[in-house]
Amino acid sequence: MGVSGARSSIALIKLEIESKRTRKEPTSKSMINNMFWRGRSDIGDYGVAEWELRPGGMVVQKRNSDVKQNSTSASTIKVKVKHASSCHEIRISSHASFGELKKMLTGVTGLHAQDQKLIFKKKERDSKSYLDVERVKDGSKLVLLEDIESRERRILETLKIAKKEKTSKTLKEIKLQVDRLAKKVAALEVAASSGGVVEELDVENLTENFMTILITLDEIYGESELKLLRREQVRRVQKHIETLDKLKIARANSNSLKSEDGMQRRQGNSAGEPNPKKQQLLRHSDSVVVTTKWATFD
């Protein structure tokens, strides 16, 4: 092969290379177009997020809000619920639970969520079960029944809670009342120990107040913690009543001693004078003797 033949071979090789490059360019461009402009969610099957072309030629990642909005609207279903003679249409997420559906039905039926029975395909559904799991679809029909036993249990539980709260409130009020009266008892004790005057009326009024509280506590019934609180107040009241009884006895003894001392003084001062009471007794004695004589005489 001569020089001219070699040159022609080289020229042919260059043409083939150029033609291959020319064929690859549109392929690369078309691939890019497919990846971005068509909004594909994968690049080379690697799961990259979706992309979109904005005005001005800028390629950006597609916003998730649009995707979420579309998915949310797609998951919302409309179900028909028959209750008595009424039929209610409820829009709800297919991923919601039967318990959430019951809460929505409370507003239109007036039934408490705990008092409802939802029947789907002739079977009662649990509140924790999900609509999509139980194959509830758009346009599905359900039946709502009132659970009488559940309503009665709920009412009893409500009354029990209300009674417990009332008992707790009453015990708190009694505790405050006992605290207030206890301060008055302490003041009387201080007065008695220091030689002061303790009025009998004050002791009697406090004793009466404590007895009234004791009667109220006797009518209260409580369990566990409330029972302990009630027992504590009963012991406090009994203790204060015992203290008042001691003060009353001490006051009576003090008054008795004072009266005896006064009597002795009066007797000492009037030793030489006739005792009117003694003379009256003597006259009475004489009359008795006379009467006795009259009886003997008869």
Image: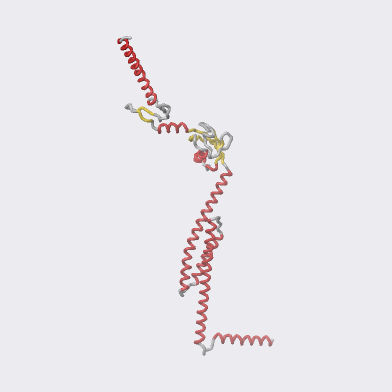
Question: Seen from this angle, which residue lies furthest bottom?
Answer: 272
Q: How many marks?
A: 0
The relative height of residue 58 versus residue 240 in the rendered view (above or below) is above
Q: Quadrant of residue 72?
A: top left
Instruction: Give the side of residue 68 with respect to residue 166, left or right.
Output: left
Residue 231: where, in percent of width, then height? 54, 60
**Could you say which is closer to the camera, residue 26 or residue 139?**
26
Q: Can you say which quadrant of the picture contains the C terminus?
A: bottom right
Q: Position of residue 96 (x, y in %)?
A: 49, 37
Judge from the rendering whether residue 62 lies leftward or rightward of residue 230; answer left or right: left
Residues 262 and 243: in front is 243
Image location of residue 229, percent across then percent down: 52, 58
Pick the front one: 162 or 296: 162
Q: Residue 108, can we see it?
A: no
**Is the image coloured rainbow, by chain, by secondary structure, or in one colour?**
secondary structure
- What residue is rendered at 57% in x and 42% in y? 147
Q: Residue furthest front?
A: 1
In which quadrant will I find the N terminus? top left
State the image coordinates of residue 81 (x, y, percent, origin top left): 53, 35
- Seen in the picture, residue 261 relative to 24 is either above or below; the reply is below
Res 119 seen here: yes
Q: Is residue 255 above or below residue 107?
A: below
